[in-house]
Amino acid sequence: DIQMTQSPSTLSASVGDRVTITCRASQSISNWLAWYQQKPGKAPKLLINKASSLESGVPSRFSGSGSGTEFTLTISSLQPDDFATYYCQQYNSYPYTFGQGTKLEIE
Amino acid sequence: QLQLQESGPGLVKPSETLSLTCTVSGGSLSSTGDYWGWIRQPPGKGLEWIGTIYYSGKTYFNPSLKSRVTISVDTSKNHFSLKLSSVTAADTAVYYCARHRSGFLDSWGQGTLVTVSS
């Protein structure tokens, strides 16, 4: 199985900050990576697919980059609605696997 | 707009079989290229992919659960189902159904909490 490791596990930041979350794969997954946002009691919401392709309707302050084994999700200017937990997921091969999550908290 | 809705018992006894159904509306299970999956999330923990089915019946499972999982599809009712046998407390989780597009999950159900307890 491909292991996905996110860092940090928790991130404290303020409105207006620029933040970056990293996701590393245990082997190359090309650019077959998605990012999701999850709020308490809700289903995850797809933000980005294929490492850098923004889903329709997702604000442009979200961006993704990377290929191979290292990927990043960047939020350019945090808004109050962005405080949530973020997950990466590889879909290069079965079994699909997720990172353990990064909880973005208000500082 | 595509909508997915999970349904099934919220409480299952240990050693019994968990059964859930995902009903799809606003779209067809038979759409070419769309796959349909189950994902779970234990309380306070991360996401785990359980398995995926194509409308033809082709299935893919997480090896960690494969021996206990069955996923089936009923295109006439536009729903797909999950069965997980021999459940224990470790199977207590919110269970989500979702649509796979090329592997990523772009539409999700709201999720349903299943508790395993006697």
Image (cartoon, coloured by chain):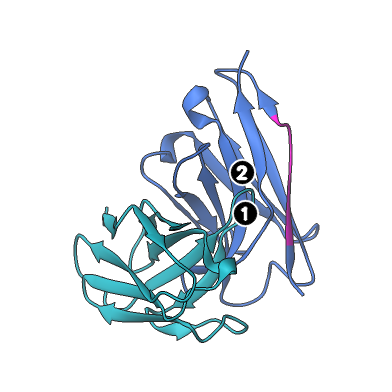
Chain colours: A cyan, B blue
**Which of the pair B103/A56 is nearer the observer?**
A56
**Which of the pair B37/A86 is nearer the observer?**
A86
Q: Residue at x 29, y 57 (%)?
A: A8
Can residue A1 be seen in the rendering of this structure?
yes
Judge whether B95 appears above or below A3 on screen. above
Can residue B100 be seen in the rendering of this structure?
no
Judge whether A11 appears above or below B86 on screen. below
Q: Residue at x 28, y 73 (%)?
A: A71
| Image quarter hosting the C terminus of chain B | top right
Any mark on residue B37, and which? Answer: none
Lower sequence index among marks 2 and 1: 2
Quick check: A40 left or right of B60? right
Disc 1 crowd rating (10 Å Cα; few below 14, some 14-19, many 20+) is many
Per the model, the C-alpha gap separating discs 2 and 1 is: 9 Å
Residue B45: where, in percent of width, then height? Answer: 45, 41
- The chain containing the residue under callout 2 comes to B
Instruction: Name the residue tied to disc 1.
Output: B97
| Image quarter hosting the N terminus of chain B | bottom right
Is disc 2 in the same subunit as disc 1? yes
| Label pair 2/1, CB-CB below 8 angstroms | yes
**First to last magenta residue range:** B4-10
Residue B80: where, in percent of width, then height? Answer: 68, 53
Instruction: Name the residue tied to disc 2.
Output: B82
**Which of the pair A75/A89 is nearer the observer?**
A75
Q: Amino acid at mark 1?
A: Cys
Disc 2 crowd rating (10 Å Cα; few below 14, some 14-19, many 20+) is many
Dividing the picture into quadrants, the one containing residue B99 is bottom right
